[in-house]
Image (cartoon, rainbow, N blue to C red):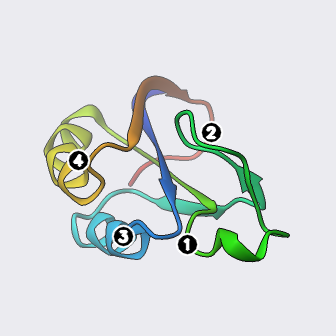
């Protein structure tokens, strides 16, 4: 088992989530996924739902990636610039299976 860091970014569709994924790829992050929610909210805003026509651009998008701490430390400042004022959560995790190579 190895220790790594998992980062979760809580964004909206209108945020630069495509650009963030491209940056993570360019920075050689071990792997990342973006999840498009059908409903949710950020901060104290109202709940947005895919069934609401006016929601355009405000549905939640979550990006999760895992890598070693040194790599995350190097990438996080760039992510903060691309997603200012968005929630970014960092937590230590244990890799139970697979690897980050």
Task: Find out whether the residues at labels 2 and 4 contact each other: C-beta distance under 8 Å.
Answer: no
Q: Secondary structure at mark 1?
A: loop
Find the distance from the CA under tag 1 to the CA under tag 4: 20 Å
Q: Which residue is mark 1?
A: 57
Of the image marks 3 and 1, the number of the one nearer the N terminus: 3
Task: Find out whether the residues at labels 2 and 1 contact each other: C-beta distance under 8 Å.
Answer: no
Find the distance from the CA under tag 3 to the CA under tag 1: 11 Å
Q: Secondary structure at mark 3?
A: loop
Of the image marks 3 and 4, the number of the one nearer the N terminus: 3
Residue in view at x 78 percent, y 61 percent: 38
Of the image marks 1 and 4, the number of the one nearer the N terminus: 1
Of the image marks 2 and 4, the number of the one nearer the N terminus: 4
Give x and y (percent) for residue 4: 40, 31
Looking at the rendered image, the disc whose residue lies closer to the viewer, 3 or 1, is 1
| Quadrant placement of the C terminus | bottom left
Find the distance from the CA under tag 3 to the CA under tag 2: 31 Å
Please say whether residue 1 is visible from this viewpoint: no
Residue in view at x 26 percent, y 49 percent: 84
Instruction: Identify the disc placed on residue 97.
Output: 2
Q: Which residue is mark 3?
A: 16
Residue in view at x 69 percent, y 73 percent: 54
Q: Secondary structure at mark 2?
A: loop
């Amino acid at each position: 088992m190895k220790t790594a860091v998992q980062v979760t970014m809580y964004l909206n569709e209108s945020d630069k989530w495509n650009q963030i994924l491209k940056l993570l790829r360019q920075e050689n992050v071990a792997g990342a996924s973006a999840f498009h929610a059908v409903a949710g909210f950020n901060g104290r805003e109202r709940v947005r739902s895919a069934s609401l026509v006016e929601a355009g651009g405000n549905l939640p998008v979550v990006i999760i990636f895992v890598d070693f701490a040194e790599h995350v430390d190097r990438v996080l400042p760039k992510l903060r610039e691309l997603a200012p004022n968005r929630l970014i959560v960092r937590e230590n995790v244990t890799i139970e299976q697979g690897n980050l190579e």
